[in-house]
Image (cartoon, helix red, strand yellow):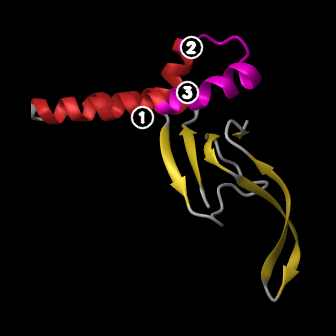
Amino acid sequence: GGAVLALVPQASALPDVLRSQKSARIPHFQESMEALEKNVMERKTIWRALMKPLTQTMLPGVPADVVWEIAETAQLTSTNEGSNIVTEGSFDEDLIVITEGVVSVERRTGWKDGKPMTAVVGRLFPGAIIGD
């Protein structure tokens, strides 16, 4: 259950994200190397997850190095089964790419005892993009 998602901040937020990453300092060389290796592996994972959906659907023909720059701003996050990722009609500036797992798309069908009733209307698989 659950899914792993790559969250890409809104484009206007990218300069702030990049500045905050540059200001982070790790005092010891070994810790720096370990952090660098971990960061590169995470970026590589995100880059691979973003390449196909971005280059084939959202940004046809975009160069791989541009997708790498987008991947540098993204972060991986996990969700638990049954978690709400986004609500229909809500305004969210992030782009979400499903990298692992399956996400159910539910539509509210009404209310019962003060709680929303929903129906599954679709499923999204790795490579699917949520957001504009």
Residue in view at x 76 percent, y 24 percent: 57
* Place of residue 15 in the rendered image (x, y in percent of width and height, measured from the top left): 44, 26
Question: Is the residue marked by circle 2 packed among few (<14), some (14-19), or many (20+) residues within 10 Å?
Answer: some
The first of marks 3 and 1 along the sequence is: 1
Spatial separation of the CA atoms under disc 3 and disc 2: 10 Å
State the extent of the magenta-drawn residues as a range: 45-64
**Three-letter code, disc 1:** Glu
Residue linked to disc 3: 48
Residue linked to disc 1: 42
The first of marks 1 and 2 along the sequence is: 1
Residue 23's place in the image compared with 105, above or below, is above
* Place of residue 69 in the rendered image (x, y in percent of width and height, measured from the top left): 49, 20
Residue in view at x 75 percent, y 57 percent: 104
Spatial separation of the CA atoms under disc 3 and disc 1: 10 Å
**Three-letter code, disc 3:** Arg
Question: Is the residue marked by circle 1 packed among few (<14), some (14-19), or many (20+) residues within 10 Å?
Answer: some
Would residue 16 be found to the left or right of residue 51 on screen? left
* Place of residue 116 in the rendered image (x, y in percent of width and height, measured from the top left): 80, 76
Can residue 24 be seen in this snapshot?
no
| Marking on residue 64 | 2
Q: Determine the image quadrant of residue 87.
A: bottom right
Can residue 18 be seen in this snapshot?
yes
Looking at this view, is 116 or 120 the one in front? 120
Residue in view at x 61 percent, y 23 percent: 51
| Mark 2 element type | helix
Looking at this view, is 81 or 10 the one in front? 81
